[in-house]
Amino acid sequence: MNRRWIALGALLLGLGPTAAPLAAQERMSAQEPPLGNAVFAGVIVDSISGEPISGVMVRMDSGQEAFTDALGEFRFQDLPQGKRLFALLTDDCRITWGEITLVAGIPRRKQFRLPPAFGAAAQEEARVEAKRQRTGGRVLTADEIDNMSARNVMELIRRVAPNMVSSTPGDPGAVSALRAGRGRSMTGSTAPPVIVIDGVRMPGAEGQLSTMEPSEVATLEIQPGAAAGWEYGSSGASGVIKITLRRGLADGAEETRPPAPCVVPTFPRG
């Protein structure tokens, strides 16, 4: 009997040193994060102004996508660790590529500074220059147009810029016409003022202005000076008349097509 107890005790003593490391290994493995638990976060800002850029799509080569919020921030919670490729896609279809190494359990956060949209600076300079070039012009709003109680748009133009409209002939059914810029510009242009309706240049639309009701017009911009038509070359020396309609495009004008959707970036396989 004593021999049995001695043998059982020896067996237990023999298992003791082996069981302890196994238990420790189990505890350690429970503390290790899974392989797909890498965290990647960041913020995207304008490289010039420093302002956050919202709506930027961040696409990982593993297929996950995220969009920046109003603060320009994004976050991926569960990414495969290792070296990862990613792409930043702005709402104006600019793509920026990048690479980052992710380690499970160690969050990574980066800041990305993207340049302004292509042509943004040039467009702003053109807008400022156009505003500077305009001299002696006027913009009528819908409320102002309604309060003037004019019979047609040509009469509105006559009230704001009398020198741009010729007198009405005495013939029955005759209508007023726009006057050429001779004597009012250094170029001596004989062309009538440029007419732009809903952003579309409309040559020969004088008759349309005589029949167009003021209630159809949302805004009427009249620039009688020669400098106002600088972007139209010599044909704008007599001034520019820009009309925005309340009900959309003018008859005969082509509708502006919406821009094509951005191409979502893809990554090579393998």
Image (cartoon, rainbow, N blue to C red):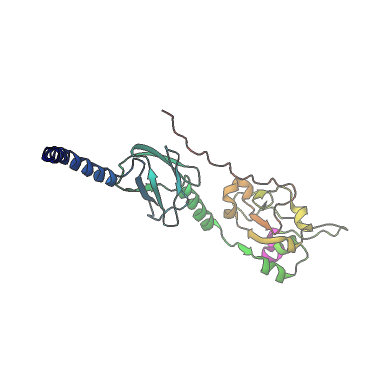
Q: Is residue 36 above or below residue 205?
A: above
Residue that extends furthest to the right in the rendered view of this protein: 172
Q: Main secondary structure of the magenta part?
A: helix
Q: Is residue 21 above or below residue 72?
A: above
Q: Compare residues 20 and 87 and report the one nearer the observer.
A: 20
In the picture provided, is 165 more to the left or to the right than 93?
right
Total labels drawn:
0
Residue 150 lies in the magenta-colored region: no
In the picture provided, is 180 more to the left or to the right than 64?
right
* Residue drawn 50% across the image and 39% down it: 264
* Residue drawn 51% across the image and 51% down it: 126
- Residue 202 position within the rendered picture, expressed as x and y whole percent measured from the top left: 70, 48
Quick check: can you spot residue 57? no
Q: Compare residues 8 and 22 and report the one nearer the observer.
A: 8
Residue that extends furthest to the bottom in the rendered view of this protein: 147
Q: Compare residues 87 and 232 and report the one nearer the observer.
A: 87
In the picture provided, is 57 more to the left or to the right than 50?
right
> Which quadrant of the figure has residue 153?
bottom right
Quick check: can you spot residue 161? yes
- Residue 38 position within the rendered picture, expressed as x and y whole percent measured from the top left: 34, 44
* Residue drawn 70% across the image and 60% down it: 217
Q: Check the picture and name the quadrant holding the C terminus.
A: top left
- Residue 16 position within the rendered picture, expressed as x and y whole percent measured from the top left: 16, 41
Q: Check the picture and name the quadrant holding the N terminus.
A: top left
- Residue 37 position within the rendered picture, expressed as x and y whole percent measured from the top left: 35, 44
Residue that extends furthest to the top in the rendered view of this protein: 270
User: Which stretch appears magenta?
Assistant: 158-164
Q: Compare residues 199 and 51 and report the one nearer the observer.
A: 51
Q: Is residue 25 above or below residue 174?
A: above
